Amino acid sequence: MPRKKTIALEVNGRIHHEAFPAHRTLLEALRELGHFDVKSGCEKGDCGACAVLVDGEAVDSCLTLAWTAEGRAITTVAGLGDAQKPHPLQEAFAKLGAVQCGYCTPGLIVASESLLRQKSNPDDDDIRLALSGNLCRCTGYTKVFDAVKEAAQARMAGGRK
Amino acid sequence: MTSGSHIPAAKPNVAWRQVGRPLERTDARGKATGATRYAGDYTMPNMCHAKVLRATMASATLRRLDASKARAL
């Protein structure tokens, strides 16, 4: 029987105390904790659907062991905003048709947020590089790029959010 | 007469209310905020789980399958 260790995971500002075995990925742990906004796609780092922010930087939660995320601030797409108070990226993705089936959307938004925190006014090459780990089979990415640029503008106009 | 000349040109019609107007998907915000539940996000009482078991030999004939360990889960 794998040995479990109780760890404290800070997700969207809330601390969860839960026991996990050493091999539990952050993706599995988050979904066990009820964070279904973190999507499980390929589970091997190809698709980016499971991306979350760890201390402000996008990582694939399927390639991160839950134990290594202890003591770090984890932010999921639901932690960025909700229907009542959407984040500028969530607003732009919805408005500009960058959401179709939507399964890749949480990962795309998280990766975009990681980019915008490092580069407030990205060009196409910056976006292409930042989203190169996120697969989307519906949109063809054009509207995703439009949404990231619109959110960047909104963010600069409204001050850093 | 050039070909296609009897195809009537589309006329603007003031009665059109949806054509030509960009519309936001009704489900876009739920998906963008992570609120939307997908099939894999649900669990039901006594739910069965399936997993693909692939043959380890090419062109082999399957004679029997011992599923006892899977059933025991």
Image (cartoon, coloured by chain):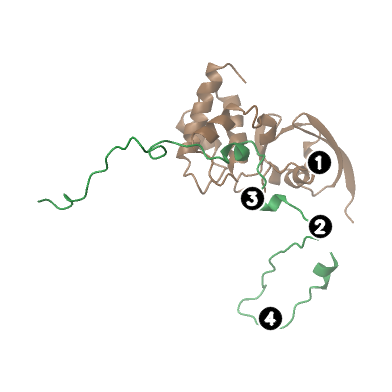
Chain colours: A brown, B green
Q: Amino acid at mark 4?
A: Leu
Mark 2 vs 1: CB contact within 8 A: no
Q: Secondary structure at mark 2?
A: loop
Mark 3 vs 2: CB contact within 8 A: no
Q: Amino acid at mark 1?
A: Trp
Residue A67's label in the rendered image is 1
Are both tags, 4 and 2, on one chain?
yes
Circle 2 chain: B
Q: Among all residues in the image, which is located at the extreme front?
A: B15
Quarter residue A161 falls in: top right
Q: Counting residues from the N terminus, which is met first, the one under dot 4 or under dot 2?
A: 2
Q: CA distance from mark 4 to mark 3?
A: 30 Å
Q: Secondary structure at mark 1?
A: helix
Q: Secondary structure at mark 4?
A: loop
Q: Residue at x 40, y 37 (%)?
A: B17
Q: CA distance from mark 3 to mark 1?
A: 21 Å
Taking depth in this image into account, of A41 and A132 the one nearest to the observer is A41
Q: Which residue is mark 3?
A: A41
Local packing at callout 1 (Cα closer than 10 Å; few below 14, some 14-19, many 20+) is many
Residue B68 lies, in percent from the top left, at 83, 73
Q: Which residue is mark 2?
A: B45
**Is B3 left, or right, of A118 in this rendering?**
left
Is residue A53 visible to the viewer in this orientation of the structure? no
